[in-house]
């Protein structure tokens, strides 16, 4: 076998002929991007600030998406064949995303596809192309994925209109229950001292008809964005764990809301159900409640960057099976360290 | 009897010696002021724009309070002995209100006292100095008044923390129920077409996973201030009247919230309970529910300007009995025409 033949084989099947993709998980806090080859081997990782246009503004979001992408490419000299950008609300398949233009200006000429963060969350846990996602973080959404495409959504319509069983939904009820308790128009609850510990540094007005604690809660809640009521959600889990009836009732209501939303979407089949978001942590009452309803079908979501990477392989037409997903997870982990 | 004696009697007991007051009802939409003598006879009426410092801003609110006051004084040449300013959140007894300074600058040197709009609402209906108020408008609050002083409050802590059974509380549930119905994760309800009739002119995004009606509702709700969800409250009354189960459930919950709030404040005595605010209209399900719980004790609130006038008489130390309140109502009505 001549060196020439080895070299030729190399350019056909080896590294030189290998195609590459980038998967981006653009979130409200951070944007993460990973460069991988078409076998799922992760080669580079980049991270930047907020990348969600809705919360960060379009310009900042695009800048952070570019920075994370360039960080993932690093000094590899690789130009990816395709970039898969996943972000909240990215439900379409736009190929002319503003980030493609910005990447070209930065010297990286590549095509960009866009998908929702429900897709990256789903494919972080499984390579099976048809299944379901139930997510509860600050907001809450359920999704049905069919043949790798988003097929249906329930809820995810925001704190004022929906987000049943989300962190906002729970936290909002926590602080309302504490206010009702403080005013003597609701049952006593262990949530009240937990809420008061958070509001203790609020100033007091010189008015004496109401209890000062009520004013403190009002100052804090109305001094922040409504959605920040989600900060009280962890108190419900703490108080419920110690047997508080009010907190348990709130979490029961949250589980009921989540099951109603996803139940209107989930078929009676064997497809996987991926549980995502901070409130569906393993062993918690919400995830356990969903698992009890759908035994043997629930998987926990992993890093959304891995899901974006698998989506990128799918979009490229590369093999995107369980082995590829396992390889993504295995080779991504050391890059994060 | 000489003219001198008549004149002398006149300056002691007649018009020349009569004391005068002004009552102001400063609201979020309009500010109304009435000039009356110490017997309760209304002599002048003035009206201006928003007079609530929280919503209108301090400067505009004071300006409108001054304009309404000067309008009530008119060309009478009367300098009132006292001005009673009533407004939302005016719970104290400040005598050095900024409006006193502004009135002095406008040439009207008088003292100003401040009271809450719960007080003017209560005293618009009764001159009995001890009793209760239950109010449901955009917000909801219950109050106990003892010897003419505010003695206790329940709720009235705003749309995010409380306002149980208010227009916001109801309207919020109406639009959430319509969204859940449209998404197929809540029961069908007659509220949905009523909500859709309001959102019909909203633009549509080019996204096809969700029903376009869901997007229309989202655009409208998130395009306005959260508290404007109160606009959907009347739909609950309409749908409930035609037998809709979801709407009836919402109104049952609202009544329950109102009864819980006021029930923690109302003693088992014979004191009057004044029902105020647009949602407690006579014959409506909420007012009838409260009347059923407290039979023979409920009165409907009238024009808050009349209550402010009676409060002004009380503050002056004048007779502020049922006859005085009746005189206020009788003589105020023609001034409004």
Image (cartoon, coloured by chain):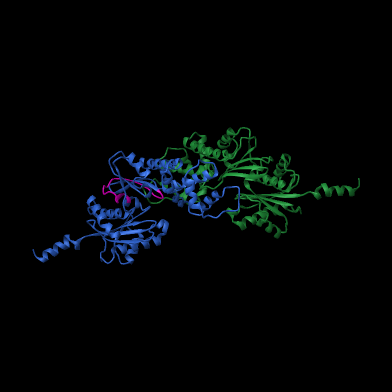
Chain colours: A blue, B green
Can you name the residue that lies furthest to the front here? A242
Q: Nearest the camera: A139 or A290?
A: A290
| Horizontal relation, residue B268 to residue B232: left or right | right
- Residue B239: give x, y in percent of width and height: 50, 37
| Horizontal relation, residue A252 to residue A125: left or right | right
Q: Nearest the camera: A317 or A63?
A: A63
Q: Nearest the camera: A234 or B241?
A: A234
Instruction: Tell me, yes or no, whether the highlighted magenta stretch contains residue B47.
Output: no
Whether residue A163 is visible to the viewer of this picture, yes or no, is no
* Residue depicted at 77% across the width and 49% down the height: B19
- Please give the range of residues in magenta: A121-139
Can you name the residue that lies furthest to the right here? B2
Can you name the residue that lies furthest to the left here? A1
Pick the quarter of the image with the C terminus of chain A.
Answer: bottom left
Q: Quadrant of residue B272?
A: top right
- Residue A119: give x, y in percent of width and height: 32, 50
Q: Indicate whether B232 appears above or below A96.
A: above
- Residue A186: give x, y in percent of width and height: 52, 41
- Residue A15: give x, y in percent of width and height: 19, 62
Q: Indicate whether A226 appears above or below A1.
A: above
Q: Quadrant of residue A60?
A: bottom left
């Amino acid at each position: 076998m001549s060196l020439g033949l080895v070299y030729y084989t190399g350019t056909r099947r080896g590294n030189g002929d290998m195609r590459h993709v980038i998967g981006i998980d653009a979130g409200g806090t951070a944007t993460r991007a990973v460069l991988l080859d078409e076998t799922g081997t992760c080669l580079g990782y980049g991270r930047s600030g907020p990348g969600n246009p809705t919360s960060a503004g379009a310009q900042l979001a695009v800048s952070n998406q570019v920075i994370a992408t360039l960080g993932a490419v690093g000094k590899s000299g690789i130009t990816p064949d395709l970039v898969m950008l996943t972000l909240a609300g990215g439900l379409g398949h736009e190929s002319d995303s503003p980030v493609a233009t910005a990447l070209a200006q930065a010297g990286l000429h590549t095509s960009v596809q866009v998908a929702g963060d429900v897709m990256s969350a789903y494919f972080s846990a499984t390579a099976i192309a048809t299944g379901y996602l139930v997510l509860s973080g600050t907001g809450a959404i359920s999704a049905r994925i069919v043949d790798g495409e988003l097929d249906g959504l329930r809820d995810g319509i925001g704190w004022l209109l929906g987000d049943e069983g989300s962190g906002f939904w729970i936290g909002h009820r926590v602080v309302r229950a504490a206010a009702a308790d403080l005013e003597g128009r609701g049952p006593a609850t262990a949530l009240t001292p937990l809420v008061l510990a958070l509001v203790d540094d609020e100033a007091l007005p010189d008015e004496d008809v109401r209890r000062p604690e009520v004013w403190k809660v009002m100052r804090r809640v109305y001094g922040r964005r409504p959605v920040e009521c989600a900060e009280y959600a962890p108190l419900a889990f703490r108080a419920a764990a110690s047997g508080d009836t009010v907190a348990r009732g709130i979490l029961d209501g949250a589980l009921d809301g989540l099951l109603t939303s996803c139940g209107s979407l989930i078929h009676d089949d064997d497809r996987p159900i991926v549980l995502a978001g901070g409130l569906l942590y393993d062993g918690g009452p919400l995830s356990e409640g969903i698992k009890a309803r759908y035994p043997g079908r629930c998987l926990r979501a992993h890093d959304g960057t891995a899901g974006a990477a698998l989506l990128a392989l799918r979009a490229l037409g590369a093999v995107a099976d369980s082995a590829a997903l396992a390889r993504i997870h295995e080779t991504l982990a050391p890059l994060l360290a």
